Image (cartoon, grey):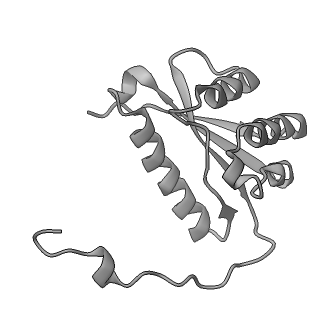
Amino acid sequence: MNGQPWHFVVVRDAGIKRRLADIKNRFCPAAKQVYRADFLVQAPVILVLCVDRLRSYGREFENGMLASSIILIGAHSRGLGSAFLTAFNRNEPGLAEEIKQALDIPQGIEPVAILPVGYPDEFPGAKALRPLTELVHDERF
């Protein structure tokens, strides 16, 4: 439908990065408290990916996820590191609202993802992947 709903807020300011980290930490579920967002402050750049509701035709989350995936792959292809942090949680709308306030995002524009970007300090080892026979199903599940 060619809505082209994306907006990208480029954050370099240390104070704003700290505020985003604090917001993410405050809304972090109890089971994930060990994964604090304090590292956001160290990122040279943070991209906050947002989508325009009207141009998304009811697919804000999907449009944001697709764009985020492309950014993550593109960053990796250029030797940059990144990570996906959600700015959207259906069960906790306060997360997106606080991010909108912190970045002066207007009504009708929804933050979907926070993507810190920089050169990685380390490269993780290969992950053990599930075999394709567990994931791919012929004709029927």
Rendered residue at 67%/53% (across/down)? 31
| x then y, percent, for residue 59 | 36, 33
Indicate the quadrant where residue 10 lies. Answer: top right
Q: Would you say 67 lies left or right of 114 here?
A: left
Q: Nearer the viewer, residue 137 or 31?
A: 31
Picture coordinates of residue 24, whole percent (x, y): 73, 41
Pick the residue in front: 73 or 88. 88
Number of dots carrying numbers = 0
Residue closest to the far top: 107
Q: Residue furthest right?
A: 15
Position of 19 relative to 139 (above/below):
above
Q: Residue 130's x, y, as percent? A: 42, 81
Q: Where does the N terminus fall, quadrant-wise?
A: top left
Rendering coords of residue 50 (x, y %): 55, 33
Q: Residue at x 50, y 17 (%)?
A: 108
User: Farthest residue in the left direction?
Assistant: 139
Does residue 116 appear in this view? no
User: Does residue 18 appear to the left or right of 140 in the view shown?
Assistant: right
Can you see residue 67? yes
Quarter the C terminus occupies: bottom left
Residue extending furthest toward the front: 30
Q: At x 49% / y 55%, what residue is drawn?
A: 69
Left or right of 74 on screen, residue 29: right
Examine the image and state in which quarter residue 20 appears.
Answer: top right
The residue depicted at 76 percent of the width and 35 percent of the height is 23
